[in-house]
Amino acid sequence: MNETVDVKELNERIEKESSFVDMIKMEMGKVIVGQKHLVDSLLIGLLSDGHILLEGVPGLAKTLAINTLASVVDAEFSRMQFTPDLLPADLIGTMIYSQKKEEFQVKRGPIFTNFVLADEINRSPAKVQSALLEAMQERQVTIGEETYQLPQPFLVMATQNPIEQEGTYPLPEAQVDRFMLKVVVDYPKLEEEKLIVRENIAKEFPKANTILKPEDIVNARNVVKDVYIDEKIERYILDIVFATRFPEKYNLDKFSALINYGGSPRASINLAMASKAYAFIKRRGYVIPEDVRAVCHDVLRHRIGLTYEAEAENVTTEDIITEILNTIEVP
Amino acid sequence: MLQKMRLHILYIVVFGFIFFSFKLNAQDITVKAKLDTTEFLIGDQVGLELEVKQPIREFVGIPIFEQNVNQELEVIEQSENDTTLLETGHYIIKKRLLVTAFDSGYYALPPIPFLYYSDTLRTDPILFHVKTVPVDTSQAIKDIKMPYGAPLSFAEVFPWAGGGVVLAIVIFILVYIIRKLRRKEPIIRRIKPREPAHIIAFRDLEKLKKNKLWQQNKIKEYYTDLTDVLRLYLWNRYSIRTLERTSEEILGSLEISDFNDDEAYDTLKDIFQLSDLVKFAKFKPIADEHEKCLSGAYNFVDRTKLIIEEKKESEEELKDREQKGEETNMLKEKVENNK
């Protein structure tokens, strides 16, 4: 079998550059039991420079996962508990007057770090959410008259509690769209939970070793961008996203009344990027339809708006995405 | 003389007994007439109830009104007699009339006669007032209101609707027949039996071969068409939704189905893997690979095609049938010999 030179080279390069993925997974596996999907999603976000919105009940190792990832990458990590009285300055920093120097000095906020865990993001008001999401998008923060670049890599993992909705400020659609992935974290399996209990009652809790530097991640991101995506796959991605907007054109007339708005162009971009990152994690130099399907739910579930009819009929975005995937012809 | 006197006395006693017993019974019979209301609007319809209470063996004739009760009251409808047996050994017979009046004023309904043998029993007279509609003369005169339209009932609509449907069906059939005749097509089309999956697949593979795509350097199109033929075949043959599934998912579906030909499975897997590399990773296989994939596809379809075989009789079944035939012949011969 003859391979064209560029794909062969690319595959070899990906093989070489992606070897750390298995190492990261192994190190994280020492601390995090199960939650493979969560770990994969973190890696996809990290490698494709996207942010992650996590939804799951408390106690599912969300904080532990990002903390472990930070320790594996030798990156800085900060956790912020979003509360109703939080102010944007608490997040990004502010100007403080120094009586000694008789001038205003910049005090940087906890957002100046590599990995940020924004816990229960929907508990704080819109102005704080907006400040965070702006920083996520621009990768920079303006305090006073100065603009400061955020460190690279910069990954925000925000959590939302699906229960206890009273006194919360739901993220607006435009803000949610800035998260590359929305990952639903589920309970561990019985055997997994047995291991979790054992680890936690043991004398010493397992610890992950540092195996990478933040620069390695930045380099890996460039390699991910080189992963080959064929025109057929691009067309497949666009078909999926367009089916969320115009379901009737894809023989999904039943969804016309259920979908209020479909995925934005950012959805198409993120679906392509996440597919590339997934192919990279699978140590492949090109994207196949399986990669698109593997990340499709996480990329699209927060980008489809449902109508009241859909809510009344208990139709979820999960159902819609699944049906779309089962209808669109695979190249 | 004394005997004659006794006979007269007896006559007097018998006559007196009969007379007094009739009187006694007549007193035991009551007749009543009652209007539902004694004050009603002109044209209103009110009920008039006639009631007779009588011992069981007596007979009182209840009057029958044809059109009017009297000059003022017109009869609209009247019920049958309603008889109730009381514990006291009496009947109560009721008759209800629906009456109306079209002249306003105070009127008396005279006693209504009930025939009782040669006697007549009468009800009490009833005074009633037929009122007119109060007219406000200070207001301007208005037009007479149009009569209210009664809603259409199902029974009224049904014949028309049913007729319409029948007419539409007849027109449709006529148009259909005329069209078919004009196009010189048979009026009743016979549905062709569905082609077997492998026939379609072989035809498509032959077409692919004739198109000579890879020879024209259209390698990607060649592998796309090749996998499409196999996907369509799998859908027709195993009812697996292949067009919306990836290669891995299709292979996974085959594994969980009753597919048990490992060699064919491996052939399909190789074709799918190579095709995916060509389609998505710019792979360019050598010419031999193209031919190998095509022959592999032929081979896969040939190995997995559904064969509907006619049941052939085994040798044992043939022998058994021959034996049975011989026995029958022997029996026939025996019967003829006995004759």
Image: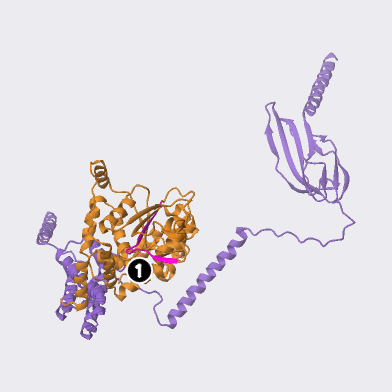
Chain colours: A orange, B purple
Q: What's the residue at 11%, 55% (across, down)?
A: B334
The secondary structure that most of the magenta stretch takes on is strand
Q: Nearer the viewer, residue A243 or B22?
A: A243
Tell me the kind of residue under disc 1.
Ile
In the image, is residue A151 part of the stretch drawn in magenta? yes
Q: Chain of mark 1?
A: A
Q: Is residue B107 magenta?
A: no
Identify the magenta region: A146-160
* Quarter location, residue A154: bottom left
Question: What x and y, as percent, mark residue A288?
Answer: 27, 69
Extreme residue in the right direction: B138
Whether residue B111 is visible: yes
Determine which quarter of the picture holds residue A178: bottom left
**Residue at point 72%, 36% (across, down):** B93
Q: In the rendering, at what x and y percent does residue B328 appear?
A: 13, 57
Q: In what quadrant of the picture does the N terminus of chain B appear?
A: top right
Judged from the image, the secondary structure of the residue bearing numbered disc 1 is loop
Q: Is residue A52 above or below residue B298?
A: above
Q: Nearer the viewer, residue B22 or A122?
A: A122
Identify the residue position indicated by label 1 in the image: A328
Toward the top, the furthest residue is B2
